[in-house]
Every structure is written in C-alpha cells, then in structure tokens.
Amino acid sequence: MAFFNYFYSCGKQPVEPHAKVEFQELRQSRCSKVTGWLKTIAQLPITIPHMIYTICMLRREQDLQAGDKSLLPNRVIHRVVLSPFRSNYLVTSDRIASRVLSNYRSDQEGLFTITKKSSISQLLLPIINYLTNKRFKVDDFLFTSDGAVAQQHRAIIHDYLGPKRLDQRRVQIEMTNRKMLSYLLRRETNGEVIVTAKDLCGLYSTSVISSILIGNKIENFDDNAKITNAIRTVLNYRVIPFLRKLSEQEQKSFTSSLNIICAFFKTVKSEFLGHIAENKELDPLQKYGLYILLYLAGVETTSSVLEYALWQLGRHPDLQNELVKELGLGKSDLLDRVISESLRLHAPVRIGREFRADTKMTVRNKEGRNWSYTFNKGDELTIVPTLIAQNTESLENPDQFNPKRKVRVSSFRSFSWLPFGSGAHRCPGQWLALAEIKSMLTQLLMHYEVVSSSRSEVRQRQLFTLGLDRGIELNLINRRTISSEGEGAGGGGQKPQAARMAR
Ligand code: HEM
C-alpha cells in the first residue's frame, strides 16, 4: 500500500502559505519521448497490473472525495490514473488552483485548456447529440470550447441570467416559492410535512429553470417530478459505466429517461430560444445545445447545495432560530454566511483543465527546497473546491461548518472559496443560483421549522455532480402551529424544536 500511497500523492509535498508555484512549458522534452514509448507499451496486452493500479487509485480518490482527511495534509497534487494514455491529478491546494486558473486563457495560448477529450465531453456530448439528434463537435459546445466560441456563448448567458436581468429572474423565483409553499401546505398533517430533501430541492430548481428557460407556467409544483427524475437518471447513469456496467434495469431506465427529456424539449416553446432568436453569432444547432446545457447545468448543482444547507440547518436548531429572528427583522447577513459556508463545504462541481504541452511544475518552499512534477500534454488537472476548502491554512478548523467565522469566507483573497470557479470559465449561472438559494431558504425558514432526522455526517458522492451520499429526510413544522403551541403553553419553556425532539 505504501507504493500506491507514494504514487497516489507524489510523496510529501510543501503546502505552506509561502510556497511558490511555477509552471514551465517543456518544448522538446525527453519526458515526451519516454512517455510516448511507455504509452506504446501500455497498449500491449499487459493490462492486469495496470488495471489493479487504476482500481486502487480510484478507490483512493473515492476515500478522498468522501472526506478521508488523513489523506489531505501535506498534499498539493494527488495522482489518479484513469487510462494508460492520460493521467488525472486531483488538485487539493488553493495555491496550485490559483496558478492553474490564472494560467488558463481563453485565447488558446496559456498552459491549460478546458478539458476537451475527457470526462465532461464524454459525459455530456452524447446526451446532447441524442437529445438534438445532431452531431455536436467539442468546439460547438460551451463546456468544451474555448476562445471566441466560448465567449459568444457566455455573452448570451450573461445577458439572460446575469445581474442585468436578475430582477426579471427574481419574479420567476418568487412564483416558484409560492407554488412550493402551497405544495407543502397541501401535504401537511397536523401542521407537519415530511419530505426528502433531494426531492424538494430537485423539484424547486427544476421549476425555477423551467420557468426561466421555457416560460413554463406549471400548475402544481410537483408537475416537474417526471422531468426532474429523468434528468437525474440520465446524468448520473452516464457516469456509472466509468465505474461499473449498468444493470439491464438501469439501462432501460436510462433509455426511457432520455426519451422523456427528448419529448419534453420537443414540445415546449422556449422563452430563452425566443430571446436569442435574433443572435447571428451562434448557429441554430449551437443555440439549441446551449439551451439544453443550461437546463442540465442549472438543476442538479443548485439542488445539491440547497439539500446540504437544509441538512446543516436541520441539525443546528439554535442557528436556525437566530437566522429566523434576523430574517424577521429584514436582515440577511447570517443567511448569506450560511450559504457561503454551505458552498464552501459542499461545492457540487469539479473544475477540469488540461495541459496543452508537456509541462514542469515546481513548488518551492521558504527554505528554497523544490518539489517538481512533470506532466504530459493532455494530462488533466481536476480542481476539487470542497477538498481545497478543507485543506487551507487561511481558516481555523476548515473542515467544520461555522457560518459565524470572523472572516467572511466568500470575500477571501484566497482560492479556498472556489464553488463557482474562477477566470474565463467561471460559472455564468452564479447570480441566478445565489438568488434561488437565498430566496428558497428565506421562504422555507420563515414558514417552517426544519428538523433533520439525520444527525450523523453526510459525505460527498461523485456522480455527475457532487451530491450527498445518502438521502436526507426533513420534518417541516409549520411555524403557525409552533406559535399556537407556544401560546397554549404560556409561551415559555422549551424551544419548539427541542420540545419536539424530546418527544
Ligand atoms: C450552486 C450552484 C452552482 C455551482 C456551485 C456552479 C459551479 C460551476 C463551476 C465550478 C463551473 C466550472 C467553471 C470552470 O470550469 O472554470 C460552472 C460552469 C458552468 N455553469 Fe455553473 N454552477 C451552479 C449553478 C449554475 C446554474 C444555475 C447555471 C445556469 C442555469 C449554471 C451554468 C453553468 C455553465 C453554462 C457553465 C459553463 C461555463 C463555461 O464553461 O464557460 N451553473 N458552474
């Protein structure tokens, strides 16, 4: 195991705040000749040792992803071999992340490019091709394009979802809030309703995206259940074949979910497509691809953060009470902090960059000692914001959920808060996502007390996005019921949640 540990983590590495990180392009490297030769050998039928090695590495990645903190200290780069032809490295240090993201340029110069051939395009392009019945190339599609094409796509998203039109978006968000509240009210028994956080949050984010992109005036909040589940199944079942073969049942469910999404997109009249109809820079295929991408990108991400925040609030009753008091006074400082801390500890997206050329990275500590790593053209760096957030020296007890930290985590001059990425591909849906999360939490907390039955830790689980590794059940107690109970009991005694838990 020591052997695997060594390769997995490249040994002990400097992570002090003063360590300097430099990248140097290797134009005519000896390394490319050697690796070219090794790659040829790797294609020969000697795959069993390689397979064992890969399986061990993937297991280690899962441990790390699941929060095995013992693997974090003194590591900046963790090597995970995914195929004989390209290596993948997990970045778990803010200094390396900052150097990688600032070295990425959208003009096709820089040392890195957006990951083109690997995971994300392998996952999303076939889905988009199936849904549109067209053949997209990687450069047509925002997630995998850079340069001018990416900028054209991003300008459209910025115009539609960015700060300029946020007030319009807020109207649609508020409409969804009203539908959510009447949905919960309908399901109440004696002032209480039990929901699965995943279902509630998935329905919520799908409803917002549907009304924004499609202008979908749904009657009932749960009318979107079918499409929510179909999107979830398709995205997640695309990932599973990388880990294991889909069962026959799963394969069937994958195909029928794809057909549900296909039918859905065919029948709807999209407000977003109407909005960009006059745009001359993107062809109709690209416009449709962008629309589907926004739909897919905007659902699971926001939903996953909401789920995490509700789980945390459900297990911190005092924080929740304080929050509700503050919201009642029209203040939202504490809520903003809860959201930033949730995004810090549960960022649902990993950020991928690919080396454009053979490259040497040097990390130099204060004493002048160097650690060097050589990467090959096409190798992939995966920046994992949640792991970086827990591996930082800028915060006290960085792995703990503490919205009341002295420092505001989101205003750090550090890369330990990276939920939306940074630089040329920074998330263009961030304003919408933050507005949604804030609005949903405010409305839910003002009307219901949230109790989470699950007190033990949840971990992150990598599927299409990073989700929670198990379902969280929430008990929502209408605050009207609480206040009338309080009156009956003379308004004193136990706090409502404590009283309920004591029962
Ligand atoms: C809490 C919710 C969200 C989080 C944490 C999140 C995070 C991210 C991250 C980390 C990236 C990758 C940046 C990079 O590669 O450098 C990204 C890209 C993207 N996100 Fe989000 N996102 C969220 C919600 C949304 C929403 C609501 C939408 C749209 C409706 C959206 C649309 C996109 C798009 C289109 C890209 C690709 C941008 C590009 O490649 O230039 N995201 N997001």
Image (cartoon, grey):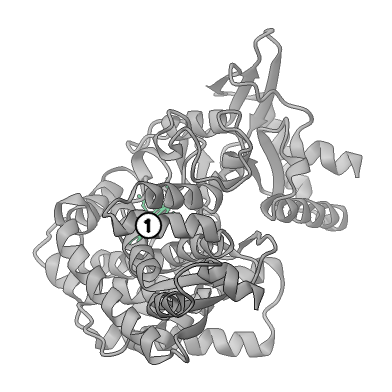
Q: Residue at x 90, y 39 (%)?
A: 2
Q: Residue furthest left?
A: 278
Local crowd at mark 1 within 10 Å, few (<14), some, or many (≥20)?
few
Q: Is residue 443 above or below residue 51?
A: below
Quadrant of residue 238 within the rendered picture: bottom right
Q: Is residue 476 above or below residue 89?
A: below
Q: Residue at x 59, y 68 (%)?
A: 498
Where is residue 180 shown, x and y percent of the image? 34, 79
Q: Quadrant of ligand 1?
A: bottom left
- The answer to whether residue 222 of the structure is visible from this angle is no
The answer to whether mark 1 is within 8 Å of ligand 1 is: no
Where is residue 280 shown, x and y percent of the image? 12, 59
Q: Is residue 448 left or right of residue 42?
A: left
- What amino acid does circle 1 point to? Lys
Q: Residue furthest top?
A: 367
Asked whether 146 or 298 is in front, the reply is: 298
Q: Is residue 312 left or right of residue 68?
A: left
Q: Is residue 308 above or below residue 18?
A: below
Where is residue 421 shown, x and y percent of the image? 43, 44
Give the secondary structure at mark 1: helix
- The answer to whether residue 483 of the structure is visible from this angle is yes
Q: Which residue is mark 1?
A: 325
